[in-house]
Image: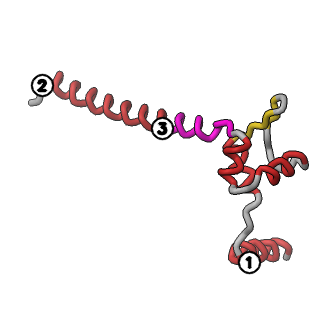
Amino acid sequence: MDNPFEIIEKRLDNIESILTEINKKLETKAITKKQEDKLLTIEEVTSYLSLAKSSIYGKVQRRAIPCIKSGKRLYFKKSEIDEWLNKRRRKTSDELRIEAEEYCKNKT
């Protein structure tokens, strides 16, 4: 018969390794979240979007792109820029066909 203290020690070691793994995953998520919430300058946004500064300024003036204005400086949250880009995604022909079929199905 196994020593009950050895069994307890093995189970505690197992629990400890699981908790360590969970902690690593949480730290990774926190780092990713910080990167998404990072504030970008106008130069960084122009590089990220491959657009000219004048295009970005035009979009800011028309309120077409989300930004933060502090005095004369502009800042952009990376997560908001990513979300803004995703909203402008064009649907594929297959996606449009499926959407149309579902619409027609629900209409009848």
Q: Amino acid at mark 3?
A: Thr
Classify residue 28 as left or right of residue 1. right
Binning the other alpha carbons within 10 Å of mark 2 as few (below 14), some (14 to 19) or many (20 upward) gives few
Where residue 66 sits in the image (x, y, percent)? 80, 44
Q: Which span of residues is magenta-colored?
A: 29-40
Viewer-nearest of discs 2 and 3 = 3
Q: CA distance from mark 2 to mark 3?
A: 38 Å
The earlier-in-sequence mark between 1 and 3 is 3
User: Does residue 83 belong to the magenta stretch?
Assistant: no
| Local SS, label 3 | helix
Circle number at residue 3: 2
Residue sitting at x 31%, y 33%:
17
Q: Amino acid at mark 2?
A: Asn
Where residue 106 sits in the image (x, y, percent)? 81, 71
Classify residue 4 as left or right of residue 99. left
Q: Residue tagged by mark 1?
A: 97
Circle number at residue 28: 3
